[in-house]
């Protein structure tokens, strides 16, 4: 069963300030301190959440906490920001009410973190899905981008928002986010040029210099050293706990998720770099003839780099810093700027450039995160805006910030009272008017269209003549002197004449949060916020694609002589729009408080917290809430919580919950004036009544706890006794079974022993009988065996004797035959020796006769005869040796036996040639007609390309296939096949090179006997069909690329669009077949093959040079074509390995 806790359970201090007793400022602060010391950073004032900044991580924002507060009543659990976010989300989803969450507080109080927590909670509890998750991610990732460009380190906060932000998150009918819209208010652009001591410029400047890569900084012409930029303060350049480099990577990633393109990010960074460069521009005076000083740029290097970043002519911007053009009707007057005015113009340009860039970023984010659906959306607004500011030195910025807070306080009181009144009417309880301080009179003092301070400031800014801050103060002293909330020492009201706490150049306004002293110095300039038209026009002339969007007033064609609206007027209008927007939504409030100025945990400064409680109007809020009934609760939870106080309602009430509450309160003797019955809720007027009920409930719970303990202990003892009793029975049963088992096992063992002895005696008796029978059988067998053995040995001896006799006869016979053979062999050898001796004697005799007969001729012909005989013998030996050393029948086998004698060189060479021709003829005899044609093509390719084209050696081993597309088999090309009537000799995919950009588009290349065809690869549609007689020549390079140009006959119909520049992986085969087909045609001149690294190609009316260059490894492994200009295409061919 799920256990539900309550706001009143385990309460540290008071969770809801409405129930605080006694109610005063000291008890209020003490309650906040007590809860803060126990890590309870959230406290309620009714439906308002007070949030204390803990300055450390607490384990109260986990996914488990999200699930704990999901779909729970607002007061059901202890105070938490998740409870308010859940209440707002469920009201929007289930009741179709637009919501707004107003987050206020001073810098460092945790407003930005509170808005992140609200958005993360809503993102966690709404629907899931790919598109929904994408929207949620974009909404959440917009925060890092805006924080980088709009937040800065201040003395009060390391991540202080220097702008006001209002985000409308749009939901569909299911409660899933569809998108959002962000509005920004009053960026503190003066921080761009100057920062107070101990503070930094906006985060993005430090993040860019710390986290960007070296290449990026080089492109932006920046250096990592902060000290090189005048706009960056050095005393707080680095902040503990902030990693600017990691933050820069986070911002880049967030911009990518939100939807920024890479070129847009680069454009934004260029503008940020330009602002830094702008701050380094310095001026020097230069005297003119007329006696006036004119400003000149000291060092033009930074000016030059900034102009290069923005694409502005340096002379144009330099003149804009030195001169100012004033237009009145049809006249133009150009005046020079002195050094002070030049610095003012530089800073004004920097502030406007950064401010407009920030507004463009907000607009660009809105384009990405806006809802795409056209249906009606439910909206939840989150307002994160500056709190009330009271400094030692308050200027124009504090004035309009406090004006905004006056408006928020006004709408807060109105909406709170209206909510109270609506609830009373809804519950049927009489409404009584509540007295409270209405700050409408202060708002009217500031925003009145005639006598308001802003109206008079605008009037003073627009008035011709000399206008200063002092004249503005004089006007205030004249018109606002009698106003009860305006104080000035120079006003007509004499009571302030001796007030030394009020300087002469200041005025004081009594706001709802207290009196604030404003120094009038700078009011007029900051309200004017002028940017000289010369600078606007110079920015408009920039080639940077964002500059014209940021400075549209610089367009010379749309010169507007009307003065632009002042900063005060613009802020007043945007605040008015914000108030109208908030009034259409159901409000939810988060009041953020900073516990100390040291940004440290566990430190609670009473004076600082008291100051914030006052200007946030929290005491006023509690009093308004307690003016009627301090506590209200539905009947069911009330009865469930207090039913134990009455016997009639305990433990269960069977009737309606309202009747049970009536019985309960009557039984508890609660006075009738202390409560009222609504339609669905019980209303309790005084917190003391509620605390009395809580005390009685606590005492009753202690009694019930004692009763429960008593019953539980009795139940536990009875259960233990029954368990022991049951255990005793079980143990006895098990023991009896064990004893019987032992007795049975003993009897069984004795029986088994007796049986085993009996069986052993019987077995031994049978064994003795069997052994006797076996011994008798073995004796008979042994006797028989001995008898048979004797018989066998006698037979064996007889057979051995007979065998010895036979072997002796064979041996004698063998010896006799051997003797006869040896005798006969000796006779034959003797006869052979006699015959050989006769032959030798005869040969010697014949030789003697020959020598005697030819002795007279021997001296004349002996050498020739011997020579011829030796030559014949050598040649005979040579030819017989060739029979064994002849090589294989392969035509490519180049081996041949070595030449034995030099006089055989001619014969040796001729025999080698004849043998090679013979085996080639034999090899050719095996060829088919198709194979013969292929070899002829290879031979022709060799004649064309060998030693001329670097690609040729790699093509030798590749067979010429011809139809690489299998056009007759592939059904995809059936239509194309039917369009080509002749036999296709070659079909392949080639790339047709586009002259405009050098890129290739795939085409089908078909070659027939009479023409070649180019067709679309996807559709098979014929793009061009060229007769071969119209083809005059083919141009290729000497390198290893696949590019070739088909040049057509001038004046032919095929040459209307010009020549074709193609590339193919089978270039050698294509050109060989083209040349071979053109040569065999009877009516066609031979096609010329031009092999050169530079040739001309005719494209329509223009001739374009195609140039081949040797590229490096960065070109990859394939040739790349690139258009250099209108007359040159350059092909980069990778270097050969």
Image (cartoon, helix red, strand yellow):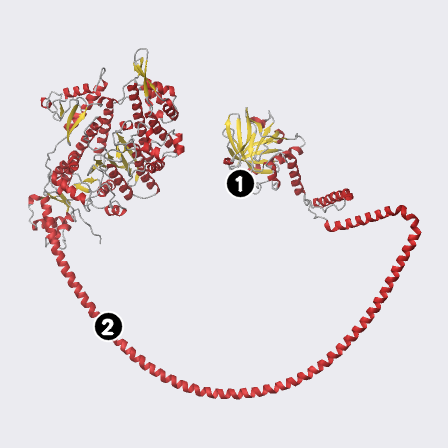
Count neighbours of disc 2 (C-alpha within 10 A) and say few if under 14, some if 14 to 19, many if 20 or more. few
Inter-mark Cα distance, 2 to 1: 90 Å
Q: Does residue 934 appear left or right of residue 817 in this picture?
A: left
Q: Is residue 338 above or below residue 234?
A: above
In the depicted view, which residue is nearer to us: 270 or 1069? Answer: 270
Q: Quadrant of the N terminus?
A: bottom left
Q: Is residue 540 above or below residue 34?
A: above
Instruction: Find residue 995 and report its horizontal and vertical position in percent.
Output: 52, 29
Visible residue check, residue 649: no
Q: Is residue 267 above or below residue 901?
A: above
The residue at the point 22 percent across, 27 percent down is 397
Instruction: Find residue 934 and report its horizontal and vertical position in percent.
Output: 65, 40
Question: Which of the 4 quarters of the picture holds residue 322?
Answer: top left
Question: Which of the 4 quarters of the picture holds residue 163?
Answer: top left
Read off the residue under disc 1: 972
Visible residue check, residue 25: yes
Read off the residue under disc 2: 731
CB of mark 2 within 8 Å of CB of mark 1?
no
């Amino acid at each position: 069963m799920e256990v539900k806790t309550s706001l009143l359970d385990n309460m540290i201090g008071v969770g809801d300030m409405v129930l605080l007793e006694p109610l005063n400022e000291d008890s209020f602060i003490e309650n906040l301190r007590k809860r803060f010391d126990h890590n309870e950073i959230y406290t309620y004032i009714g439906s308002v959440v007070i949030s204390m900044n803990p300055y450390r991580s607490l384990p109260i924002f986990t996914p488990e906490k999200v699930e704990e507060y999901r779909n729970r009543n607002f007061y059901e659990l202890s105070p938490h920001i998740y409870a308010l976010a859940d209440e707002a989300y469920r009201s929007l989803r289930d009741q179709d009410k637009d919501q707004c969450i107003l987050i206020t507080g001073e810098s460092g109080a945790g407003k930005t973190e509170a808005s992140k927590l609200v958005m993360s909670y809503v993102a966690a509890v709404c629907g899931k899905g790919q598109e929904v998750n994408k929207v949620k991610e974009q909404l959440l990732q917009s925060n890092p981008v805006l924080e980088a460009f709009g937040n800065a380190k201040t003395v009060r906060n390391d991540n202080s928002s220097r702008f006001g932000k209002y985000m409308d998150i749009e939901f569909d009918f299911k409660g899933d986010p569809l998108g959002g819209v962000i509005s920004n208010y009053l960026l503190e652009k003066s921080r761009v040029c100057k920062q107070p001591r101990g503070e930094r410029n906006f985060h993005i400047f430090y993040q860019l210099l710390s986290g960007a890569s070296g290449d990026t900084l080089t492109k932006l012409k920046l250096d990592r050293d902060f000290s090189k930029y005048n706009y960056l303060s050095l005393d707080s350049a680095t902040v503990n706990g902030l990693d600017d480099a990691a933050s820069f990577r986070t911002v880049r990633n967030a911009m990518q998720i939100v939807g920024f393109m890479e070129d847009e990010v680069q454009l934004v960074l260029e503008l940020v770099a330009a602002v830094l460069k702008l701050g380094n521009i310095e001026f020097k005076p230069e005297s003119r003839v007329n006696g006036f000083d004119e400003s000149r740029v000291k060092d033009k290097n930074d000016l030059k780099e900034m102009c290069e970043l923005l694409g502005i002519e340096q002379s144009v911007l330099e003149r804009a810093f030195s001169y100012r053009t004033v237009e009145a009707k049809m006249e133009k007057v150009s005046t020079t700027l002195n050094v002070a005015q030049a610095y003012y113009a530089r800073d004004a340009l920097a502030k406007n450039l950064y401010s407009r860039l920030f507004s463009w970023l907000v607009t660009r984010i809105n384009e990405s995160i806006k809802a795409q659906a056209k249906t009606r959306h439910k909206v939840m607004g989150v307002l994160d805006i500056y709190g009330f500011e009271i400094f030692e030195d308050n200027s124009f910025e504090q004035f309009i910030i406090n004006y905004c807070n006056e408006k928020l306080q006004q709408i807060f009181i109105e909406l709170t009272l209206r909510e109270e009144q609506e609830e009373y009417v809804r519950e049927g309880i009489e409404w009584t008017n509540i007295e409270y301080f209405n700050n409408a009179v202060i708002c009217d003092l500031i925003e009145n269209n005639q006598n308001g301070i802003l109206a008079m400031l605008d009037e003073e800014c627009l008035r011709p003549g000399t206008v200063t801050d002092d004249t503005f103060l004089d006007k205030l002293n004249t018109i606002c002197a009698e106003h009860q909330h305006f104080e000035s020492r120079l006003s007509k009201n004499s009571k302030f004449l001796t007030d030394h706490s009020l300087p002469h150049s200041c005025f004081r306004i009594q706001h709802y949060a207290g009196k604030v002293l404003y120094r009038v110095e700078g009011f007029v300039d900051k309200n004017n916020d002028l940017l000289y038209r010369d600078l606007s026009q110079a920015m408009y002339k920039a080639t940077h694609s964002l500059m014209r969007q940021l400075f549209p007033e610089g367009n010379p064609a749309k010169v507007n002589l009307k003065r632009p609206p002042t900063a005060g007027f613009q802020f007043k209008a945007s605040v008015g729009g914000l108030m109208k927007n908030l009034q259409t939504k159901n409000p939810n409030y988060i009041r953020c408080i900073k516990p100390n100025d040291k940004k440290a945990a566990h430190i609670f400064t009473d004076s600082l917290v008291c100051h914030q409680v006052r200007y946030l109007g929290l005491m006023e809020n509690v009093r308004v809430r307690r003016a009627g009934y301090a506590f209200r609760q539905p009947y069911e939870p009330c009865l469930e919580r207090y039913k134990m106080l009455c016997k009639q309602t305990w433990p269960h009430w069977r009737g309606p919950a309202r009747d049970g509450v009536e019985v309960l309160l009557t039984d508890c003797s609660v006075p009738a004036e202390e409560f009222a019955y609504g339609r669905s809720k019980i209303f309790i007027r005084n917190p003391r009544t509620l605390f009395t009920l809580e005390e009685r409930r606590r005492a009753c719970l202690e009694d019930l706890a004692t009763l429960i303990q008593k019953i539980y202990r009795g139940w536990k003892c009875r259960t233990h006794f029954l368990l022991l009793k049951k255990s005793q029975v079980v143990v006895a049963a098990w023991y009896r079974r064990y004893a019987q088992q032992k007795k049975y096992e003993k009897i069984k063992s004795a029986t088994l022993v007796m049986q085993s002895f009996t069986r052993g005696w019987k077995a031994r008796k049978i064994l003795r009988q069997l052994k006797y029978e076996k011994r008798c059988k073995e004796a008979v067998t042994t006797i028989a065996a001995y008898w048979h053995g004797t018989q066998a040995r006698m037979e064996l001896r007889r057979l051995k004797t007979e065998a010895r006799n036979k072997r002796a006869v064979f041996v004698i016979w063998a010896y006799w035959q051997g003797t006869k053979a040896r005798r006969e062999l000796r006779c034959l050898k003797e006869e052979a020796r006699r015959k050989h001796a006769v032959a030798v004697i005869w040969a010697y005799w014949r030789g003697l006769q020959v020598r005697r007969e030819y002795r007279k001729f021997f001296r004349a012909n002996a050498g020739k005869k011997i020579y011829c005989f030796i030559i014949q013998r050598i040649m005979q030996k040579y030819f017989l040796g060739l029979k064994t050393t002849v090589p294989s029948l392969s035509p490519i086998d180049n081996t041949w036996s070595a030449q034995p004698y030099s006089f055989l060189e001619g014969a040796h060479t001729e025999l080698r040639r004849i043998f090679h021709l013979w085996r080639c003829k034999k090899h050719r005899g095996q060829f088919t007609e198709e194979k013969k044609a292929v070899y002829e093509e290879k031979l022709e390719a060799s004649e064309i390309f060998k030693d001329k084209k670097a690609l040729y050696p790699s093509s030798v081993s590749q067979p010429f296939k011809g139809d690489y597309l299998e056009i007759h088999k592939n059904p995809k090309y059936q239509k194309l096949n039917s369009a080509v009537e002749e036999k296709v000799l070659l079909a392949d995919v080639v790339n047709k090179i586009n002259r405009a950009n050098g890129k290739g588009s795939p085409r089908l290349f078909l070659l027939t006997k009479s023409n070649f065809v180019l067709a679309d690869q996807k559709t098979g549609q014929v793009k061009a069909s060229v007769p071969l007689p119209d083809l005059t020549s083919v141009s290729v390079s000497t390198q290893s690329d696949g590019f070739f140009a088909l040049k057509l006959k001038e004046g032919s119909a095929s040459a209307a669009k010009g020549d074709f520049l193609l590339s193919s992986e089978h270039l050698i085969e294509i050109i060989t077949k083209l040349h071979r087909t053109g040569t065999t045609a009877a009516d066609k001149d031979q096609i010329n093959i031009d092999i050169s690294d530079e040739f001309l190609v005719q494209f329509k009316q223009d001739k374009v040079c195609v140039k081949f260059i040797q590229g490096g490894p960065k070109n990859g492994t394939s040739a790349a074509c690139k258009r250099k200009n209108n007359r040159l295409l350059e092909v980069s061919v990778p270097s050969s390995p």
